Image (cartoon, grey):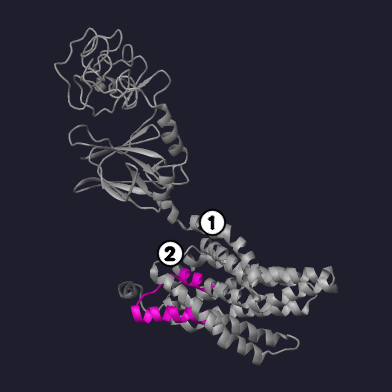
Amino acid sequence: MSEIHITVNGGLYRYGPGVVRLGRSSENDIVINDPTVSRRHAQISLEADGWTWQNLGQAPTFLGGQPVARFIIADLVDVSLASPQGPSIRLQAVPDGAQAIAAGPIRTEMAAPGAVAAPPAHTPTGPGFPAAAAAAAAPGVAPGVAPAGAFPANAGFAGGPGAPAGPGYQGGPGGPGGPGGPQPGGPQPGFAPGGGPGGGPGAGAGYPAAPGMPGFPGFGPGAPLDATRLERGSFFETMVPIKSWLHDKGWRQGLRLLMIPYALLPLLFLQIFAMSKSLATPGWAYSLYVAPLWLIAFWYLVRPPRWSKLEVWIAVGVVIWEYIWLHLVTININDHLVGGGKLTFPKALIVGFNEETSKAIPVLIAAALLLQLRKRKLDPRTWMIMGTIAGLTFGVIEQSIYTPQALITVANAGRGGGVAQADFGALEFAFRVFVDGFQHAVWAGISGFFVGMAINYRRRRIPILVLGICIPAVLHALNDYTLTVFSTVWVTVFFVQGLSLLLFLGYTLSAADIERRVRRNPAFRGQSIIMERFSQP
């Protein structure tokens, strides 16, 4: 099998030996413009066993209604992408010597109105087949498409009305097996006997009639059609395909699964609030509800390399470490060194360095252990995401300290505190639930990037780590200090928070470029470019 024919949306693509890629992305050889299809859905390659289909993306491929990941294209097959009802593709492996291999892909467009699409040019001519070679020889006509009027009456196939009998599709008047034409001596394998039961007039030795149409076994006066069964079964199963939904691998995609809890959890929260006596319960519930949404946003901004089970376990370890360290160390340091009273800038710096160090430590330990025990370095963007995970965890835990007081403020407002007090309590609750984790994640994401760079480039490891902690710690301190000194939040919003977001977004945009420049700069390298290339795992 040296050539593959791929039919998509009425267009025929022909490829010689090599690899053909299909998917939604414009980078593929064949682009399938359907949102359910993966960006890099599959590839077709010529291997020792023949042309082979290999699924690449998350969306599945269906052959005969069943999901398949890899199969050999033996002759002619139809597959569906993403679901059994998804975009359909016809694949045909062409035997050696049946047709000269075209130089590059050739697309056969649909014929213009009035024209007739001829069968593929590799179809052999002779009795029972159209004379494709004559059609392909017509000037100005794409391969496989016959111009209008190129064949006499009824698509120009021999045996059509008013056409002389000869090599062509049999079964028409004047053709073999049709009225006026010689009848075959017996049925041929795979075709309905000409003029016999179950076959239309002159349907011998040619192509059989389509299933469910006159001339096909099971249709006609001798076999009445059960319209009741058709309506109850086929119609309902077509419009509500529950069986195919249950077998569709699209249910395993994360965003679809995420829709289920995000639709149902708010109702469950109401029941939990009614049963719980702790004022921290609403804060825990809604902050855990919001944190995954922020993580998805950070993921699409940072775009780290694909994760494996190793990265997932590291993220779990970061969450566990952060929860324990915050309760045992961070809170105690803040209480003993800062205490109560007015928050001065030195106190704000203590808080900033204490909390940002708490978020950077688990990321640094994980990166150092991975390098020491497994001799493996990860992309700095991976550690940047680990930093945001540590920051979100810190924010979720911190809100549980402040949200109960906000709810008490709202409750006291109903006892004579006034509308302003109620509004302040409600806004404080919303801020802690929706924004607290986001702020900590932005600062921790910056330090996480610096941790990754420090681990990967040892010559400037200490200066990189110090800078990576100082930047978010100072921003954190300025955030807390300006909120207590100024009577308005505009200074914090436009100066501190704006600068923090600018730095975070800047590193998400240029993380890979920064690492490329560092790799080429001898000041950051502990060894030569050639030696590091051979020594890195």
Magenta residues?
A: 360-387
Relative side of 230 to 358, left or right: left
Residue at 36%, 38% in the rendered image: 89
496 or 431, nearer to the observer: 431
Q: Which mark is residue 259?
A: 1
Q: What is the secondary structure assignment of the residue under circle 1?
A: helix
> Please, is residue 317 above or below residue 269 in the view?
below
> Comparing marks 1 and 2, which lies closer to the viewer?
1
Q: For this rendering, which residue is in front, 440 or 525?
A: 440
Residue placed under numbered mark 2 in the picture:
305
In this view, which residue lies farthest toward the bottom? 336
Residue shown at the point (35%, 53%) measured from the top left: 56
Disc 1 crowd, CA 10 A, few/some/many (<14, 14-19, 20+): few
Q: CA distance from mark 1 to mark 2?
A: 24 Å
Amino acid at dot 2? Pro
Task: Give residue 92's quadrant in the image.
Answer: top left
Residue 292 in the image: state x and y as whole percent.
55, 65
Q: Nearer the viewer, residue 315 or 269?
A: 269
Quadrant assignment for the C terminus? bottom left
Is 366 within the magenta?
yes
Q: Which amino acid type is marked by label 1? A: Met
Q: Residues within 10 Å of mark 2 (few under 14, many from 20)?
A: few
Which numbered marker is on residue 190? none
Q: Main secondary structure of the magenta part?
A: helix
Residue 435 visible in the shown view: no
Q: Position of residue 326 (x, y in %)?
A: 57, 83
Which label's residue is closer to the chain start, 1 or 2? 1
Q: Is residue 272 magenta?
A: no
